[in-house]
Amino acid sequence: MREVAPRTTRLGLASLAWPIVAVIVVQTLIAALSIYTMSAVRAYVGGESLWSKGYMEAIYQLHNFAETGDAAHFAAFEREIAVPLADRSGRIALQSTPIDLDAAKDGFLGGGNHPDDIAQQIWLFRYFQDVVYLREAIEHWTAADRMIVALADMARSIRLERALIGNPDAARIAEWQGRIDGLKAEVRPLTDAFAASLGRGSRAITWLLFAANLATATILVLLGVMRLRSLLNQRAAVVRALRAERERAQVTLSSIGQAVVSTDAEGRVNYMNRVAERLLGVSMREAGQAKLSHLFEVGNEGGPNIEQIMARLLNAEPVASTPSPRMLTRRDGAAMPVSIVGSPLLSDGRATGSVIVLNDMTREKEFIDRLSWQATHDALTSLANRRAFEAAISARIAQLGSQPSSNAVMFIDLDQFKIVNDTCGHAAGDALLRLVAGSLRPICEPVGTLARLGGDEFGFLLGDASPAAAAGIAETIRRTVEQLDFHWNDRMFRMTASIGVVELSSAMATLEDTLRGADVACYVAKDKGRNRVHIHRTGDGELQERVGEMAWVERIHRAIAEDRFVLFFQPIMALQTGAAGQHVEILLRLSGDDGALVPPGAFIGPAERYGLMPLVDRWVVGATFRVLAAREAAKSRPLITTCAINLSGQTVADAGFADFVRRQFELHGISPRRICFEITETSAIERLDLARAFIDEMREIGCRFSLDDFGAGMSSFNYLKSLPVDYLKIDGSFVRDMLHDEFDRATVEMIHRLGKLTGKQTVAEIVEDEATLFALREIGVDFAQGYVIAAPAPFLVAAEDDEDAPRLKRRAGNPRLN
């Protein structure tokens, strides 16, 4: 019924209006025809005046010429007689077969008629020449034209005779003048009859058109009377429907969770729901008929104040919500961030009131502010992150075109960080990174942008500094790190750093080339013995090529060819059941030339930079499927039901990767339900269309998906609905400090609730202690992963090779964790 009622109303209005519209159209056409016809008649009357004037003046000039023989009088005669002669040629052109319209136009134009009237004269002559009045006028016109021709002939005869005999006697002149006066006497009645015929025709047309307009007006009035009752009935029905709809709207507004305020046409409050009363700190009885500006104010940052908002609404202009929250201040002084949306209440296109919706954005603003900060800062060190660092470099490159200057980009890599991290754990590594950041900040931040790029790598953009000054600051940074004494659990570590410097002074530079140059220079510093500064110059091109191609590209290709990658796995515990070992994440290591395992942080970054991740991910998928198939054949325990495999953004964008995965499923006989692909939020969002297409294709065959590092970037929340994933993997930076940071805990809780709302399970990573595990279970998080559950172990075929299996079984049965 909701769809049919508007259509029925529209059809009823159409059936009501069309007869009236038709009569109005007909009346308009009649009026237009009347005006056009009368204009044509007026043009003929004006033309007749010019015709008569020309004819009479021609007689006068010929009369003088007959008496004096002055050539000037004859020239004047010819000029004046040309007007009626031209009208005559126009009439003859219209009466010819076929009609010569061009000759007719030229004739009427020569007759002195206005160019804008000629089309109307031709139209009236062509289509109404048989009407009695116009027919009579044309007959008189034709007869008069014969007199015109006779007058022209007489003029030529007089001129010729004067030329032959010279000066005539008085009798001859009197004869000529008598003949001229005779033609004048014959033409006068014809011109009077022509004018009289046009006058009668004009009056007849006027009465006819008056009668037609009167008839159409009468029909219009009758139709209005006939439809009036129907209109009144419809109006009564609409009033009843509006009254019922208003009652339903008030019930609805009273029950929604947003503050709703409505005003009259003067901006005075006439309705507030209960949420609005609580938000504004005033009851409806107290606020009744008060203006909104008396109840609260909104800051003018980023948008209009409340008076301007009301002025726009009462001017029938809607008010959309601003991108960021507005600060609302109540009359008791309390302030809170809100979003404001307003709509005018319209009647006949005029605003009769307004509706304003206020939404308390206190928690959202806190969360957005924190996420905005996290989008450009490193959570561990509070320095700028890689995204902000790259944005700063891009901005500086853009300035070089108009403001030439010398700048430097540095990559700072800690040499002994792996030793600290491996021997003392992640907590020690994090403390060391904070110590380094705090030591470098006083040196770098006053003159440039210091950032943590990831792992133990820092970046520094130095502005407006000569190469020599940049080298000096780089050396200062190196000495500062070298002089650090890092203590952890009665152990002391001396730190050093390898620094790569690249000059940035050309507007032709690109972000990619600049970062690559600094990365290569840093690698060269490490390759030459570490604890040194290497400045990348133009002449280092060969070294850069050798390092780029032979270091990482060659190593990764050789690792794939020689099968030197090693699979590890880390169990993921189901928190609500305590089961561990059936859900695992596959991790990757590289076996170095000396047999030592190289962590992924050392080669994943270069592999991504040089586009090798699709090759690496293919190796991981193939090797994982082989081990899963072998474990299934050997009936190894525990049975792995979910195996999570990380994919890079490059792999997701690889058009042939989906076909490769399908072939691997067929080759090894692995059920797609056992595979969960993990895609980081950054790679998924940067390639949203490709990620969505890949996810949809794999989900069709049964694979599941997890969105890794969720929450680390603000943009992931905006695109969550677009990615049909099964798991949200809460970024470990929130989990690690959630027991000590209320915001981190609130973020974990919000992500978990968001997952539940969207039908997704949540996984917490980097769970380091049992207290955090207990807190996660209390929140309701579905899975947890970290060293407190199990450390990564080689992913082998036989169950007895899984060294962590006994400990996993003990932990699963630990009552403290259940």
Image (spheres, rainbow, N blue to C red):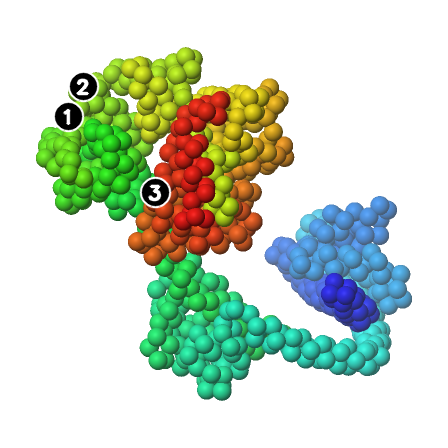
Compared across the picture, whether 145 is left or right of 770 comes to: right
x and y percent of residue 209 in the render? 82, 73
Answer with mark 2 or mark 3, whichever residue precedes in sequence: 2
Q: Residues within 10 Å of mark 3 (few under 14, many from 20)?
A: some
Give left or right: position of 742 versus 343.
Answer: left
Q: Nearer the viewer, residue 16 or 10?
A: 10
Q: Residue at x 46, y 62 (%)?
A: 321
Amino acid under label 2? Lys
Judged from the image, the secondary structure of the residue bearing numbered disc 3 is loop
Could you tell me if residue 625 is visible in this image?
no
- According to the image, label 1 marks what residue? 532
Q: Residue at x 21, y 23 (%)?
A: 526
Q: Quadrant of residue 562?
A: top left
Residue 36 vs 235, above or below: the answer is: above
Of the numbered discs in the image, which one, if any, rests on residue 528? 2
In the figure, 405 relative to 2: above or below?
above
Q: What SS does tag 2 mark?
A: loop
| Foreground pick, 763 / 448 | 763
Q: Position of residue 242 (x, y in %)?
A: 68, 77
Q: Which residue is the site of mark 3?
A: 768
Q: Nearer the viewer, mark 2 or mark 3?
A: 3
Residue 783's mark?
none
Q: Position of residue 195 (x, y in %)?
A: 79, 70
For marks 1 and 3, give the CA distance.
35 Å
Q: Please name whichever residue, 430 or 64, is drawn nearer the observer in this view of the structure.
A: 430
Q: Residue at x 42, y 64 (%)?
A: 361
The reply to whether dot 1 and dot 3 touch (C-beta < 8 Å) is: no
Q: Amino acid at mark 3?
A: Glu
Pointer 1 local density, CA inside 10 Å: few below 14, some 14–19, many at least 20: some
What type is the residue that disc 1 sits on?
Answer: Arg
